[in-house]
Amino acid sequence: MALKRKRSVSQTGIVAFFVFWMHFAIGDVSYSLPEEIKRGSVIGNIVKDIGLATGKLSLRKARIDTEDNSKRYCDINLSTGDLIVSERIDREALCGDKASCVMKQELVLESPMELHRISLHVQDVNDNSPLFNEDLVKIEIQESADRGARFLIEEARDADVGQNSVQRYSLRENEHFKLSVDGNTVELVLDKELDRENKEAINLILTAMDGGSPPKSGTVGIHVTVLDANDNAPVFTHTSFCTTK
Ligand SMILES: *[C@@H]1O[C@H](CO)[C@@H](O)[C@H](O)[C@H]1NC(C)=O
């Protein structure tokens, strides 16, 4: 897994002075890393990226902290200046549906006091599959339903974001139904009319795929019960009625 690195160090003296004055900071760094990266992985060398003198970290009592006492996700190796992953980073748990997921951490040097903000941009990994609410959906359709009739099916959800979320659906080939997908709206479309006398129930399989590489999928069974529409004229025995005027 390649780690991309972005450096954003304040360039002009005025900005540098202002930031320094506000936060005792002369440079902030931001890194991009995939979620679920192994503990102990090296994110980058923060000493080089900020431009600090190496070999003085212990002396200056360097440590990683957070702005608001939230959880620490990284640590610093005081002899090398490497920033190390110290906690599991689960993007879904931390950021849910949000497209961008940034963890704020700080490098604190105590003597003399100096503070650098560290932004960890957590990239989504396709670690979740599309999921339907149920394993089996049961629907009832009148055998008199016209060709083109539509039946809504609840869409699948995927905890991942972007390309790693649900991208497409497919319906296993069958005689009666086709699939129509428009955004989040998934519908069965009756393509060939039903006949209860011929078939009382139809079983379908719907698959949702995400766009990860490799992609992940989830399926739901659809059980269609064909309801009688009384289309066969009942057979009556002849009765004689006597009417008088
Ligand atoms: C810091 O890095 C060095 C060199 O990779 C390693 O030998 C040492 O064990 C590390 N220290 C800690 C506390 O992880």
Image (cartoon, helix red, strand yellow):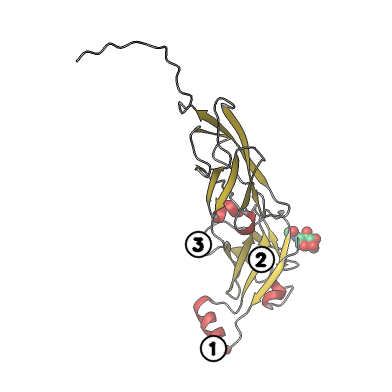
The image quadrant where one finds the C terminus is: top left
Residue of label 3: 68
Label number found at residue 32? 2
Q: Amino acid at mark 2?
A: Ser
Counting residues from the start of the chain, the first of labels 3 and 1 encountered is 1
Q: Amino acid at mark 3?
A: Asp
The local secondary structure at tag 3 comes to loop
Q: Residue 184: percent from the left, percent from the top?
A: 53, 52
Determine whether 27 is above or below 157 in the image: below
Q: Nearer the viewer, residue 205 or 109?
A: 205
Indicate if the residue with disc 2 has its beta carbon within 8 Å of ligand 1. no
Residue of label 1: 14
What residue sits 57% from the left and 28% below the top?
201
- Residue with the most extreme left position: 245
Residue 223 in sight in this render: yes
Which one is closest to the eye, mark 3 or mark 2? Answer: 2
- Residue with the most extreme front position: 245
